[in-house]
Amino acid sequence: MKDHPSQSIHSGLTCRDLTDRASEYLDGCLPILTKVRVGLHLASCTHCRAYVKQIDLVCTALRNLPKLYPSPVNRLRLRQQFAASHTN
Ligand SMILES: [Zn+2]
């Protein structure tokens, strides 16, 4: 019987541990030791490699969003500039 992916353990981290830390790993927020263990886990676990890749794509897309949609602050500033240039 094959182990369920979430129960298999690589390099001291379970797949669950890894998915919990995936976004921190991509942000580079993990302590160096945890980062190494995550790296080792990813090297031996195709499930988590696929998962981290997906998270990475989502994070990249989210990081690009502010360029497409002005933030509330930018929108307010644009409105003020618009109002200021039309008061004469
Ligand atoms: Zn895994």
Image: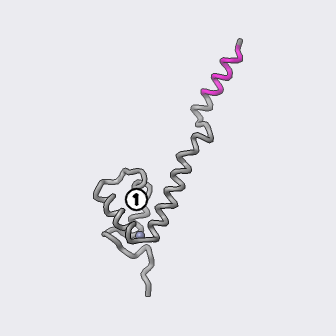
Quarter residue 24 falls in: bottom left
Q: In terms of image quarters, where does ligand 1 lie? A: bottom left
Above-or-below relation of 32 to 10: above
Residue 55 at x, y percent in the picture:
50, 58
Above-or-below relation of 70 to 50: above
The residue at 39%/56% (across/down) is 25
Above-or-below relation of 33 to 45: above
Q: Main secondary structure of the magenta part?
A: helix
Above-or-below relation of 15 to 66: below
Q: Is residue 13 in the magenta section?
A: no
Quarter residue 18 falls in: bottom left
The residue at 38%/68% (across/down) is 43
Q: Residue furthest left?
A: 33
The residue at 71%/11% (across/down) is 88
Find numbered disc 1 in the image and state the secondary structure of the residue it sits on: helix
The residue at 68%/17% (across/down) is 85
Query: Where are the magenta residues, as a range?
Result: 77-87
Q: Which residue is mark 1?
A: 21
Q: Residues within 10 Å of mark 1 (few under 14, many from 20)?
A: some
Q: Is residue 54 left or right of residue 15?
A: right
Residue 40 at x, y percent in the picture:
34, 66
